[in-house]
Image: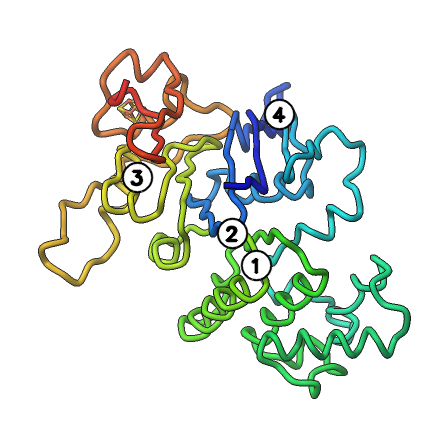
Amino acid sequence: MNKIIQLKDVKKYYPWKNKKFVKAVDGTSISVNKGDIFGLVGESGSGKTTLGRIMLRLIEPTSGSVFFEDREITKDKKINKSIRKKMQIVFQDPYASLHPRRKIKDIIGSGLKTHNMVKSEHEMIEKVENFLNLVGMGREHLYRYSYELSGGQRQRVAIARALILNPEFVVLDEPTSSLDVSVQAEILNLLMELKKKLNLTYIFITHDLILARIFTEKIAIMYLGKIMEYGETMSVFNKPLHPYTEALFSIIPRIDAKDRSKKIILSGEIPSPVDPPTGCRFHTRCVRKLGAICENSTPVLKEIEDNHFVACHLYT
Ligand code: SF4
């Protein structure tokens, strides 16, 4: 399988008070194959959004390497324009991500000018119209402003803006979380169609486990800046190995009574990323903690089953 993105031991620390640091991402390695829909799942503060932005180099990592295809993009002083074009993002909030004083044609088309992909305004408008059609909107929207559109239409515009540059890799940062449930389904179906049509690879960032289950093919479960478990989505959902994943999955509502396993209620709050627990980051809340080894030694990700990795001393 061809890898499109690889992260090697990536860290992102933000300076904090008293010479301390917020450890938003703390030593993450991951590979994403071309054509994957890869979910990054976790509670707020788990580091999933920071990791998604590091992949695009919208945020510079403190250390570690990021490869796009075979090129280490963290070695370049500035990201190469042709690579930037191949990596795009759709933000969570379509209300905030679209400029309120720009017409839709300019919001979607400005990247074409920046990357010299069109020779005239006429050519730009033609391309924008094609991409509006691709996301299920018509030319009547070309001269409107974003505040004249519904939430779903705005997110369609945001998707068209990302795709008009012909990217190969798109980070979807909670793309449906600010939308009504019925609109969420439409946008996810659209994203799925576009993925097939345009041969895309997605990173799907979400805190919603049900969405992760239906939309992704692989997932990584993050907690306090580290990946706790990752693998094929169905394998992780059918047989979660890490106690944190087990606890998260145990609270998903289920219709079939046979599927209702006992709920695992995690005690306490997620600890501060300024002073994360030593050893296993999850030990302060883990119901299966083994003792000193969990408090003192950091478990590393190990392949426990075929393409199913877990970082937990229960498996060492
Ligand atoms: Fe629980 Fe220990 Fe596994 Fe961490 S390493 S999840 S504390 S059993």
Which residue is the site of mark 4? 64
Question: Residue at the spot x=42%, y=45% of the render?
Answer: 41
User: Disc 3 marks which amino acid?
Assistant: Thr
* Residue ranking furthest to the front: 1
Q: Residue sitting at 14 percent across and 45 percent down?
A: 262
Q: Which residue, given by chain and number where applicable, does mark 2 sit on?
A: 35
Residue pictured at 54% horizontal, 47% vertical: 34
Sequence-wise, which precedes: disc 4 or disc 2? Answer: 2
Is the distance from the Cβ of mark 3 to the nearest ligand 1 atom less than 8 Å? no
> Residue at label 3?
245
Asked if marks 1 and 2 touch (Cβ < 8 Å), the reply is: yes
Q: Is residue 191 above or below residue 56?
A: below
- Check disc 1 and report the residue beneath it: 199
Q: Please, what is the three-letter code of the amino acid marked with disc 1?
A: Asn
Q: Residue 193: give x, y in percent of width and height.
A: 50, 68
What colour scheme has been applied to the protein in the rendered image?
rainbow
Q: Work out whether mark 1 precedes mark 4 in sequence or the reverse, and give the earlier one.
A: 4
Determine the residue located farthest toward the right in the rendered image.
Answer: 120
Determine contact: label 1, label 3, CB under 8 Å: no
> Would you call the spot at circle 3 few (<14 residues within 10 Å), some (14-19), or many (20 or more)?
many
First in residue order: circle 3 vs circle 4: 4
Helix, strand or loop status at disc 1: loop
